[in-house]
Amino acid sequence: MTHVPDSHPRALSLRLRERLVQGLRLGITSEAGLIAHGRGEALDYLLGERTHDFAEQAIGVAAAFILLATHPVVSVNGNVAALAADALVALVERCPAIRLEVNLFHASDERERRIASHLARHGASNVLHPSEHPWEPLPRLEHNRQKMCRDGIAAADVVLVPLEDGDRCGALVASGRRVITIDLNPLSRTAQRAHVTIVDELTRALPRLHTQLASDQATARESLAERIERYDNALQLRRAVAVLRAGVSPS
Ligand code: PTJ
């Protein structure tokens, strides 16, 4: 593993890259995952590598959806597992109703099992994955992402699908579930189709979601429902696109 000193001006970014490279070596991240990460890096650079108000607004509503859900599930792919295993486990510790379910675009039973073990090593228990748990297909989807574990996404009313493919996001929305995503590209089909789009880098967004869940745990259900009612995802996406187009000054 390449040592990145704290003094390096791009230390944070390089360390995230290292996690992905390690993920590839451990057999949990796909080769295509490195390309997806590069695209995310470029967009994050243009956003000034910081969390904007449009993401904060979305995080507030994401927390409301999760806290009001009967059966919230977080879908974990190879990039998400490599980048954010600890943050996912912390989320479940904060909100034990959340289940983690492995769901991959690039089909591999072996990679599913490795991701589940990786999450378990970071403290997760009962991670669902279709290679070992009964699953049913999500209608309107023909590739590997159609798999929904019966005790997980198939039973879920709210799903968080970070770094997602647009057609699955659309199929989940069409299935009647509430869909939250984390995606640095406000123009992606996923971003445009989800009910709540957090336009932010995954490893910045998840700890913020954790904090929001903690501070909202005693918030009245009516207030959470009102927050959802007032929220306009299309507006927050337009704000994100405007920042990308205008550009931010480097910090
Ligand atoms: O492990 P698998 O087989 O399920 O594959 C996972 C990837 C991510 C490779 C697969 O889902 C894929 O190809 O995704 P896309 O279509 O490239 O979409 C990923 C989206 O996430 C893009 O819009 C990226 O800009 C965005 N993205 C990438 N890295 C980050 C990110 N958004 C937030 N934080 C990131 N770190």
Image: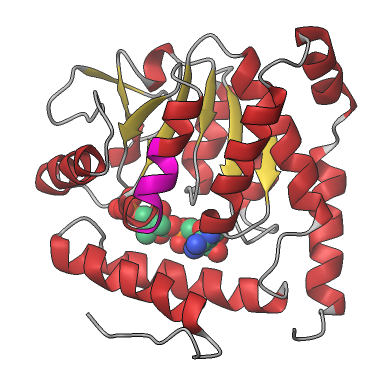
Which residue appears at 63% of the width and 38% of the height? 211
Please indicate whether residue 34 sits to the left or right of residue 204 in the image.
left
Measuring from the top left, give residue 9's x and y in whole percent.
Answer: 56, 90
Residue at 15% across, 61% down: 26
Ligand 1 positioned in quadrant: bottom left
In the rendered structure, does residue 186 fall within the stretch colored magenta?
A: no
Q: Quadrant of the N terminus?
A: bottom left
The answer to whether 161 appears left or right of 234 in the picture is: left
**Residue 244 location in percent, x, y?**
78, 72
Span highlighted in magenta in the image: 83-89
Q: Left or right? Give the position of 233 relative to 108.
A: right
In x, y percent, where is residue 177?
A: 56, 20
Locate residue 166, reporting x and y percent.
53, 47
Residue 87 part of the magenta segment: yes
Q: Residue at x 74, y 35 (%)?
A: 60
Q: Quadrant of the C terminus?
A: bottom right
